[in-house]
Amino acid sequence: MQKRPLGKSSLSVTPLAFGGNVFGWSADERRSFELLDAFVDAGGNLIDTADVYSAWVPGNRGGESETIIGKWLKKSGKRAQVVISTKVGKWAEQPGLSPVNIRQAVDGSLKRLQIDCIDLYQAHEDDASVPLEETLDAFGRLIDQGKLRVIGASNYGAARFADALAVSKQHGLPRYESLQPEYNLVNRAGYEKELEPLIQRENIGVISYYALASGFLSGKYRSAADLAKSAARGGAVKKFLTPHGLQVLAALDAVSAVQHATPAQVALAWLIARPGLTAPIVSATSVEQLHELLGATTLQLGHDEIAQLDLASA
């Protein structure tokens, strides 16, 4: 699987990232180990998680995903083969981007992950209560200490992200080398209108989430009756059951038939082909499902097929 540079950093990542939000939630420890092994054995290297994963599950408190990844790293011996990305800022037990919280959160993540250095550490969301200079300086000190390699940001608006880049340049601080926005075939405008021009101009890596729109772009949900197929995803998918959403599915079906691929593979291949996009994040709860999604990395869409999908999803 060919690797891509992450911004101007020294990190290189494969064109699909594995989302660790399922670990400790819809995938138990044993299944999580199987999925991680399958992902790496297939050539994948970017594993995305966060300290808050998966605090929303009854009985969990957060940190479960990092803990499972840490156990897998120790058991598998595959630390050198992967890029570990985690996040800070959204966990109720350690919220925000104050220097004190960042220092404490990093140490907690390192302990759970059982590693000495986090490859990519992301601000999970903006914290307007803390000056950008203080947040970036805290990250910089942790880089100097060898606890972090590269920093990134998730869920930042274009103006705030641009301000962060300007502060880094003005004060000689490390800059965010990646951005993690929501982006997929049925949710394009928010990213493309303001964020995309900025990241291309500044050479920022992009690791997008909700790549399959909570499963809608898999083609499994085409009517209100289909929502009952998944109690966990039904509510999130319902908003896409519109004439626009169904138009996108029809285009996916048409391209899938020509490519002899699944709608999910085509939707991911469209993202992978997008200029400036480094790696969409995918999640899977079975090895079979993961292998299907990984098939997107070898799918070459023609210019006419990309244009067809662009038009249907515009």
Image (spheres, rainbow, N blue to C red):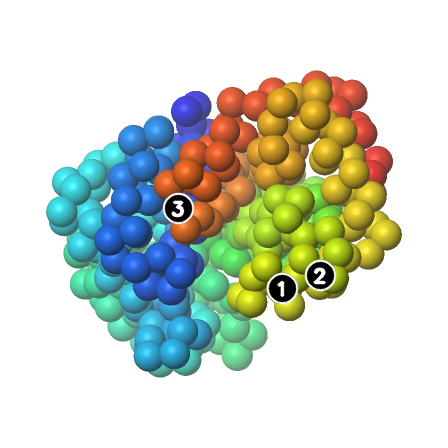
Instruction: Give the quadrant of the N terminus.
Output: top left
For residue 14, above or below residue 227: above
Q: Residue at x 37, y 34 (%)?
A: 44
Mark 3 falls on what kind of element? loop
Residues at marks 2 and 1, CA–CA distance in whole angstroms = 6 Å
Which mark identifies residue 228?
1
Q: Residues within 10 Å of mark 2 (few under 14, many from 20)?
A: few
**Relative side of 307 to 104, left or right:** right
Q: Earlier in the sequence, mark 2 or mark 3?
A: 2
> Residue 290 falls in which quadrant of the image?
top left
Which mark identifies residue 286?
3
Which mark identifies residue 27?
none
Which amino acid is tagged 3?
Ser
Q: Mark 2 — residue? A: 225
Residues at marks 3 and 1, CA–CA distance in whole angstroms = 20 Å
Query: Residue 153: x, y in percent?
Result: 50, 56
Query: Residue 203: x, y in percent?
Result: 56, 37
The answer to whether residue 101 is seen in the rendering is: no
For residue 157, above or below residue 261: below
Q: Earlier in the sequence, mark 3 or mark 1?
A: 1
Residues at marks 2 and 3, CA–CA distance in whole angstroms = 24 Å
Q: Residue at x 50, y 46 (%)?
A: 281
Which amino acid is tagged 1?
Ala
Tag nearer the camera, 2 or 3: 2
